Image (spheres, rainbow, N blue to C red):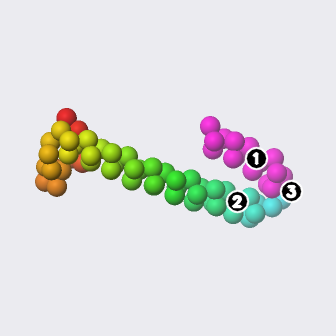
Amino acid sequence: GQFQQIESQRSTTDENKGNFSKSMTSFLHQAEEKIGQLQKEEERVFLLVKEITEYFHGDSTKEEAHPLRIF
């Protein structure tokens, strides 16, 4: 998917010109942005799971050992 696209762009542009450092800097910047997006999405999903769990089990999530248990 997207990683292959980034990899192919990197291969055909900067690395072919011998600019490995610039290529890696660009890759790391893109990776940091993606990790940030994924962390925000993870927080959102956990909040939704918590809401659903509280709906079905009351406020037992504080003592629940399995935060992903819904039913």
**Residue 16 located left or right of residue 45:** right
Screen quadrant of the N terminus? top right
The residue lying at 27 percent from left, 46 percent from top is 51
- Binning the other alpha carbons within 10 Å of mark 3 as few (below 14), some (14 to 19) or many (20 upward) gives few
Q: Is residue 27 left or right of residue 34?
A: right
Say the numbered circle drawn on residue 17: 3
**Considering the image in quadrants, where does the C terminus appear?**
top left
Measure the C-alpha gap from mark 2 to mark 1: 11 Å
Q: Secondary structure at mark 2?
A: helix
- Residue drawn at x 74%, y 64% as measured from the top left: 21
Number of numbered tags placed on the structure image: 3
Residue 33 is situated, as x and y percent measured from the top left of the image, at 58, 57
> Cα distance, mark 3 to mark 2?
15 Å
Q: Quadrant of residue 68?
A: top left
Nearest the camera: 71 or 27? 71
Residue 6 lies in the magenta-colored region: yes
Report the amino acid beneath label 2: Ser
Closer mark to the observer between disc 3 and disc 1:
1
Q: Which SS does the magenta portion mostly show?
A: helix
Q: Which residue position holds label 1?
A: 9
Q: Secondary structure at mark 1?
A: helix
Residue matched to label 2: 26
Magenta extent: 1-17
Lower sequence index among marks 2 and 1: 1
